Image (cartoon, rainbow, N blue to C red):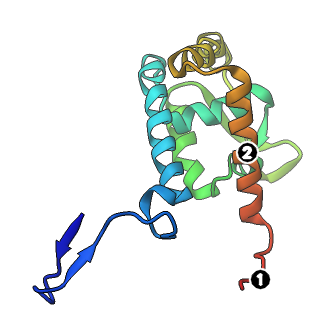
Amino acid sequence: MEIVSAAHPRESVDTTPDAGDLLALDRQVCFALAVASRTVIGLYRPLLEPMGLTHPQYLVMLALWEQEPLRVSELAERLSLEPATLSPLLKRLEAGGLVVRDRDPRDDRALAVSLTPAGRRLRRRAEKIPPAIIARLGMEVSELEDIRDRLTTLIDATHSPAAPTR
């Protein structure tokens, strides 16, 4: 596809993606991740809405269903979130009667988050979400686990020191 340059009307600019073009949109890992994230999280929305949860709140609940109580700092680390980002999520979950925040008995200076009985009961309903997502995607569990493992490797690579550029 050719576009006539506005700066130089007689020049044309070739916008056809080149297999070697490092800036081609379809070659960008960040683009594929952004689209995958947006579309996969979108599949969760209709499953979470009847439970009164957003996707970020669901992630908090998943972490707490695994282990509770957790200090806010531990929960933030587990979810790869800043505590300031986590705080409004916890306030909404607390207002919804799903979690409580209290002083950590191990350290009075820290807040610990625990599930309420309603938060624990919600787990039963949430157990239906993974099979629904797997069915909707039409992929094998092993394929999804492989994708998750490769993404975890990618995430870990972002935390390691940068390799020297050539």
- Mark 1: few/some/many CA within 10 Å (<14, 14-19, 20+): few
Q: Helix, strand or loop at disc 2?
A: helix
Amino acid found under the numbered disc labelled 1 = Pro
- Image position of 99 (left or right of 137): right
**Residue 125 pos. (x, y %):** 59, 11
Counting residues from the N terminus, which is met first, the one under dot 1 or under dot 2? 2
Q: Is disc 1 in contact with disc 2, using a CB cutoff of under 8 Å?
A: no
- Image position of 15 (left or right of 39): left
Q: Helix, strand or loop at disc 1?
A: loop
Please, which residue is most extreme toward the right here? 106
* Placement of the N terminus among the 4 image quadrants: bottom left
Which mark, residue 38?
A: none
- Mark 2: few/some/many CA within 10 Å (<14, 14-19, 20+): few
Residue at 48% over, 50% down: 34
Q: Is residue 109 above or below residue 44?
A: below
Residue at 78% over, 40% down: 70
Q: Nearer the viewer, residue 130 or 21?
A: 21
Q: Which residue is mark 1?
A: 164
**Residue 69 pos. (x, y %):** 79, 34
Which mark, residue 150?
A: 2
Tell me the CA gap for discs 1 and 2: 23 Å
**Residue 160 pos. (x, y %):** 80, 67
Q: Is residue 13 above or below residue 159?
A: below
Residue at 62% over, 35% down: 59
Please, which residue is most extreme toward the bottom here? 8
Residue at 11% over, 86% down: 10
